[in-house]
Image (cartoon, rainbow, N blue to C red):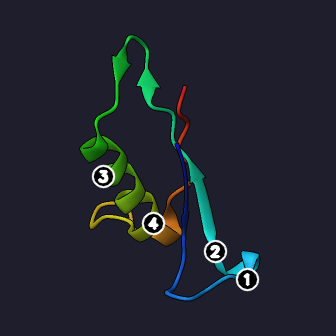
Amino acid sequence: MRVVLGDKDEYVPDQLAAYEVPLRTGDELRTPHDVAAVLRTVHTGTHIYPRDRGSTPSWE
């Protein structure tokens, strides 16, 4: 699934963040809740891993 996030009415590519999240992990499918949780964590960080201290996750 490809998702592009940005501010409302933003169209300039440099101001947008694009993510590609695989919908399958091994033999299991991700739920919409899983995808939303991944995007929320990557986009905003968590109290344990702030966004500016994280790295791009490996989806393998």
Task: Give the tally of numbered discs.
Answer: 4
Q: Residues within 10 Å of mark 1 (few under 14, many from 20)?
A: few
Badge 4 or badge 1: first in the primary sequence: 1
Please give the name of the residue rendered at 44% of the width and 24% of the height, measured from the top-left corner.
24
Give the image location of residue 50, x and y in percent.
Answer: 40, 68
| Among the 4 quarters of the image, the one containing residue 40 | bottom left
Q: Nearer the viewer, mark 3 or mark 1?
A: 1
Residue on which the image places disc 1: 12
Question: Helix or strand or loop: what does disc 1 sit on?
Answer: loop
What separation in Å lies between label 2 and label 1 (alpha carbons)? Answer: 7 Å
Q: Amino acid at mark 3?
A: Ala
Badge 3 or badge 1: first in the primary sequence: 1
Residue on which the image places disc 4: 43
Please give the name of the residue rendered at 29% of the width and 61% of the height, measured from the top-left corner.
48
Left or right of residue 46: residue 8: right
Question: Helix or strand or loop: what does disc 4 sit on?
Answer: helix
Q: Nearer the viewer, residue 25 or 55?
A: 25
Left or right of residue 36: residue 26: right
What separation in Å lies between label 3 and label 1 (alpha carbons)? Answer: 25 Å
CB atoms of marks 2 and 1 within 8 Å: yes
Q: Amino acid at mark 2?
A: Leu
What separation in Å lies between label 3 and label 2 (alpha carbons)? Answer: 19 Å
Badge 4 or badge 2: first in the primary sequence: 2
Residue on which the image places disc 2: 16
Q: Amino acid at mark 4?
A: His
CB atoms of marks 3 and 4 within 8 Å: no
Please give the name of the residue rendered at 36% of the width and 45% of the height, measured from the top-left corner.
35
Which quadrant is the C terminus positioned in? top right
| Among the 4 quarters of the image, the one containing residue 58 | top right
Give the image location of residue 14, x and y in percent.
Answer: 74, 78
Give the image location of residue 22, x and y in percent.
Answer: 51, 33
Q: Is residue 5 above or below residue 30?
A: below
